[in-house]
């Protein structure tokens, strides 16, 4: 089965690796006995599902979540069950990659119309006159 990231990108589940470890947080006595924290591991550099451009995009935008070997990890310990944490880890993985792989729209440069520039200058001159009229006139006598 594959995990859908975007409309055109699917990552097979066999590229994802899950490990369980002891979790902090709620669980009472259970927390000391059962490994409920799930860590999702994904090898970005060796993934055949990603293009080179996508790999570098992920590495560039998620440097704190990727180790030196190019493996991305996500820790989840929100629920008391492994299954719940596994689902949350997959969900976070999909959201994270979908967010990173969005191509930014480039802004088309536009010119400020001459009329707008002239109105701005005229308003500045008007404000200058208003403020100049507020100050007292000092006549210097010699």
Image (cartoon, rainbow, N blue to C red):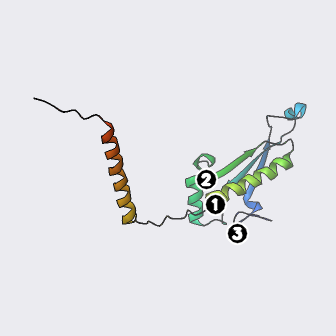
User: Are the residues flagged by discs 1 and 2 in contact, CB closer than 8 Å?
Assistant: yes
Q: Of the residues tagged 3 and 2, which is closer to the observer?
A: 3
Instruction: Out of 37 and 98, give the one closest to the viewer.
Output: 98
Q: Which residue is mark 1?
A: 46
| Residue 29 image position (x, y, % from top left) | 89, 31
Quarter of the picture containing the C terminus is: top left
Look at 47% across and 67% down and name the residue there: 108
**Is residue 48 placed above or below 66 in the rendered structure?**
below
Mark sitting earlier along the chain (3/2)? 3
Look at 61% across and 53% down and name the residue there: 70
Instruction: Out of 46 and 105, give the one closest to the viewer.
Output: 105
Secondary element at image label 3: loop
- Mark 3–mark 2 Cα distance, whole angstroms, equals 24 Å
Look at 76% across and 54% down and name the residue there: 91
Farthest-out residue, right: 29
Instruction: Out of 121 and 105, give the one closest to the viewer.
Output: 121
- Mark 3–mark 1 Cα distance, whole angstroms, equals 22 Å
Residue 113 occupies which quadrant of the picture? bottom left
Secondary element at image label 1: loop
User: Are the residues flagged by discs 3 and 1 in contact, CB closer than 8 Å?
Assistant: no
Secondary element at image label 2: loop
Determine if residue 120 is in view.
yes
Mark sitting earlier along the chain (3/1)? 3
Q: Which residue is mark 2?
A: 70
Quarter of the picture containing the N terminus is: bottom right
- Mark 1–mark 2 Cα distance, whole angstroms, equals 8 Å
| Residue 110 image position (x, y, % from top left) | 43, 66
Look at 22% across and 32% down and name the residue there: 138
């Amino acid at each position: 089965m594959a995990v859908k990231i975007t409309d055109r990108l699917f990552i097979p589940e066999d590229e994802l690796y899950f490990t369980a470890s002891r979790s902090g947080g709620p669980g009472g006595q259970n927390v000391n006995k059962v490994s409920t924290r799930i860590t999702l591991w994904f090898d970005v550099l060796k993934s055949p599902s990603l293009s080179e451009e996508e790999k570098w995009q992920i590495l560039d935008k998620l440097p704190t979540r990727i180790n030196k070997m190019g493996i991305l990890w996500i820790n989840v310990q929100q629920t008391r069950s492994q299954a719940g944490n596994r689902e949350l880890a997959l969900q976070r993985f999909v959201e994270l990659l979908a967010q990173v792989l969005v191509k930014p729209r480039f802004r088309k440069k536009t010119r400020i119309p001459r009329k707008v520039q002239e109105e701005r200058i005229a308003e500045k001159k008007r404000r200058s006159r208003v403020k100049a009229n507020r100050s007292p006139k000092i006549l210097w006598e010699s």
